[in-house]
Amino acid sequence: MKNYNNPDKGIILIIVLWVLFFLSVVVLTLGFKNRINIRLRSLNNEELRAFYLAKEGINRIIIKLAADDAGFDTLKDDWSKELVLEKDYGVLSVKVTDEDRFLNINLITREVLNSVTGLFEGLQKEELDAIYKRRPFNVPDELKDINLIDEDKFDIITPKGKVKLYDLLTTFSDGKLNINTVPEEVLLMIPGMSRRMAEVIKDRRQNRPFEDKDRLSEELSLLGLTPEQIGSLIKIAKVNSSVFRIKSKAVSSGRSIQKLIEVVIRREEGGFKILYAGEN
């Protein structure tokens, strides 16, 4: 007669069940790890593709800038148009900012800095002194770090919305302003410049850009600017641009990866020089 209550057989069954349990756990763990590794490799591949797509955006703009052989630059030039490119593995968008349309905070004279109060009326003399003494700045945003100044004093309201003083400044240009691209707010920071004359300059360049630096004084006088206004403008004006900020953003097709590359380059005879480069 068989003994179905044999304890040895029960122990063996339990051991077998535990072995099967641990084997299933091992299999599930290995499967999970494999899925994670596959996902990580996929993300790494996406990130790599996004990086090279963003880098391609930088190269495309540099090619456009190299092909721009005119002696003057405007915001209608091909390089200034936003570049959008769709590929199977992602979408690229590239924006270019002409740094020569802004005042160089490290190079402007005290006279020009004092005229900033005509636009930013909240700034006082002692606060301008603090800005002047703090120079040189690495980036204009460092104006925020001057404890003496309330950041709200950097605001002006324009038809296009609120503008900050440090958004109208740069640290990369040669100190000259491209009269064909300079925004009205920056023109108004030039000593003696009136809003009416700034609008006259904008209207003129919209229809016909300034092409010759040597004829700039003559052309400004024909627009009705006073000798004082012309003198202030001529000191810091030019008709071409040489420093550009390029922001190239690539988004992977799965939208799980975004890559942004930002560079500031200076166009020189025979090539380009990188002044700043960063990515995230």
Image: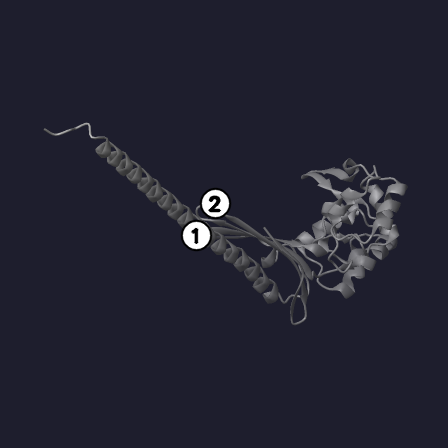
Depth order, front residue of 140/158: 140
Rendered residue at 86%/42% (across/down): 127
Rendered residue at 79%/56% (across/down): 220
Depth order, front residue of 222/164: 164
Element carrying mark 2? loop
Rendered residue at 63%/67% (across/down): 69
The type of residue carrying mark 2 is: Ser
Asked which quadrant contains residue 147, the reply is: top right
Q: Where is residue 106 in the image (x, y as percent from the top left)?
A: 80, 54
Q: In this view, does 123 lie above or below 273?
A: above
Element carrying mark 1? helix
Q: Is residue 52 above or below residue 251?
A: below
Q: Is disc 2 surrounded by few (<14), some (14 to 19) or many (20+) residues within 10 Å?
A: few
Asked which quadrant contains residue 262, the reply is: bottom right
The type of residue carrying mark 1 is: Arg
Q: Position of residue 258 (x, y in %)?
A: 52, 48
**CA distance for labels 1 and 2:** 13 Å
Q: Which residue extends farthest front?
A: 1
Q: Say which of marks 1 and 2 sits in front.
A: 1
Location of mark 2 (residue): 256
Depth order, front residue of 52/91: 52
Q: Where is residue 207 in the image (x, y as percent from the top left)?
A: 66, 53
Q: Where is residue 181 in the image (x, y as percent from the top left)?
A: 69, 54
Location of mark 1 (residue): 41
Quadrant occupied by the N terminus: top left
Q: Which of marks 1 and 2 is nearer the N terminus?
A: 1
Q: How many marks?
A: 2
Depth order, front residue of 178/45: 45
Instruction: Say whether marks 1 and 2 touch (CB < 8 Å).
Output: no
